[in-house]
Amino acid sequence: MKDSNFAEIRTKVIQDIIQLTREKYVYPEIGEKIATQIQTKLMNGEYDEVIDEMELAFNLTSDLQSISNDRHWSVVYDPKGVGDQVDPENEADEDRMRRYLEKARKTNFGFERVERLKGNIGYIDLRLFEPSEYGGETAVAAMNFIANCDALIIDLRQNHGGYPSMVQLITSYLYDSKPRLINTSTIVQRVIPSNFGHSHTSPGNVDRISPSMCSPVAIQVPGRRNLLIT
């Protein structure tokens, strides 16, 4: 698409993102802030030097994430996959659920890798916290696999957030049966229009587990010698 029409198409893509952000972002006041700043960048010519689709997608993703402090944002250029895209506003609920479950199954409900390392150390590479009502059996299998390990590493460096119910399920394996108060103040159940997708952890929570900002955290848990969340 490197022709004389690219500048016009580039502007149209950015304007569409601005409009959708104002109309659809789950936090309206933040959506307005994002849209205004992207609009200012467009008017100031900050995207004029972008000459191809991949660079435009990269720059927009970077700007949207940095302005919103929300790493759920992603702009992708995928001409081959565009035919498979579905407009959620025109999709039946049962079709949306079927498509979601198939996608979640193919990613093993976020559990990318579970293994026992040398030294009897359990390791879980967890990419997403899927709802426990769908990913619960996979989570139980993963936690049972590392049940006899002396230490556990939960790798969240490539985790994109998700649902509190899965966080609660996994956490339940790390403590004994004694009632405990767990601080979940950083987990927010977003109120989202039914045609706009699912709820996720809050932007602040996502940043703490993003690859560029995460530091390993060692936690002492009764019944386990060490737990490392990285």
Image (cartoon, rainbow, N blue to C red):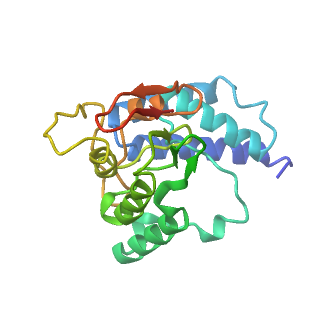
Residue in view at x 64 percent, y 70 percent? 83
61 vs 3: above or below: above
Q: Is residue 14 left or right of residue 223?
A: right
21 vs 144: above or below: above
Residue 29 point in image, percent of width and height: 34, 31
Residue 97 visible to the viewer: yes
User: Looking at this view, is 139 or 94 the one in front?
Assistant: 139
* Residue that sits furthest to the left in the current view: 179
95 vs 138: above or below: below
User: Looking at this view, is 223 or 20 the one in front?
Assistant: 223
Residue 139 point in image, percent of width and height: 39, 58
Q: Is residue 212 left or right of residue 52?
A: left
User: Looking at this view, is 210 or 19 the one in front?
Assistant: 210
User: Looking at this view, is 199 or 133 the one in front?
Assistant: 133
Q: Is residue 218 left or right of residue 222?
A: right
Task: Report the number of discs.
Answer: 0
Residue 91 point in image, percent of width and height: 42, 72
Quadrant in which residue 130 is drawn? bottom left
Residue in view at x 33 percent, y 51 percent? 166
Residue in view at x 68 percent, y 43 percent? 57
Residue 176 point in image, percent of width and height: 22, 43
Q: Is residue 40 left or right of residue 192?
A: right
